Image: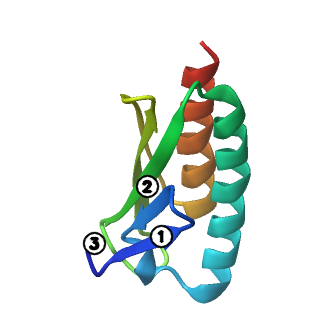
């Protein structure tokens, strides 16, 4: 496991999120946890999800957040990515996209 990686339970891996402040991480963990509950209901065999955060153009107060998500569903990956200036909007969009792909 990479030193910039956080594991939430055994099936959620957050990479690149150590640079996010503590208050924002509380919200990130809550959002991810809520989506993972939905994924568990939608997946045939939920194996885990990995979210990778990359800060693009890191300028104070105007950075962009890029998040890549890979969910393993019985050996088949479901991937999504999104970029925005707001971390929470980016997280919601990328996880919402995975949810809609699972519903198809």
Q: Find numbered disc 2 in the image and state the secondary structure of the residue it sits on.
A: strand
- The disc at residue 51 is 2
Q: Residue furthest top?
A: 104
Task: First in sequence, mark 2 or 3: give its number.
Answer: 3
Q: Quadrant of residue 43?
A: top right
> In the image, which is nearer the foreground, mark 2 or mark 3?
3
- Residue 80, horizontal then vertical, whole percent: 43, 36
Left/right of residue 34 with respect to residue 45 in the rendered view: right
Judge the density around disc 1: few (<14), some (14-19), many (≥20) Cα neighbours within 10 Å: few
Q: Calculate the distance from the C-alpha at mark 2 to the C-alpha at mark 3.
A: 14 Å
Q: Residue furthest bottom?
A: 22
Quadrant in which the C terminus is drawn = top right
- Residue 51, horizontal then vertical, whole percent: 43, 55
Q: Calculate the distance from the C-alpha at mark 1 to the C-alpha at mark 3.
A: 9 Å
- Residue 36, horizontal then vertical, whole percent: 64, 47
Q: Quadrant of residue 77?
A: top left
Callout 1–callout 3 Cβ contact below 8 Å: yes
Residue pictured at 51% horizontal, 62% vertical: 10
Residue under numbered circle 3 = 1
Task: First in sequence, mark 1 or 3: give its number.
Answer: 3
Q: Find numbered disc 3 in the image and state the secondary structure of the residue it sits on.
A: loop
Asked if residue 86 shows in the view, the reply is no
Residue pictured at 64% horizontal, 18% vertical: 103
Residue under numbered circle 1 = 7
Task: First in sequence, mark 1 or 2: give its number.
Answer: 1
């Amino acid at each position: 496991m990479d030193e910039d990686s956080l594991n939430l339970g055994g099936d959620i891996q957050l990479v690149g999120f150590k640079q996010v402040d503590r208050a924002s991480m509380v919200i990130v963990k809550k959002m991810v946890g809520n989506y993972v509950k939905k994924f568990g209901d939608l997946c045939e065999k939920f194996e885990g999800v990995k979210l990778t955060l990359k800060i693009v153009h890191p300028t104070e107060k105007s950075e962009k957040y890029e998040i890549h998500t890979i969910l393993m569903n019985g050996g088949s990956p479901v991937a999504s990515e999104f970029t925005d200036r707001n971390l929470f909007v980016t997280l919601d969009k990328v996880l919402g996209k995975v949810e809609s792909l699972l519903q198809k």
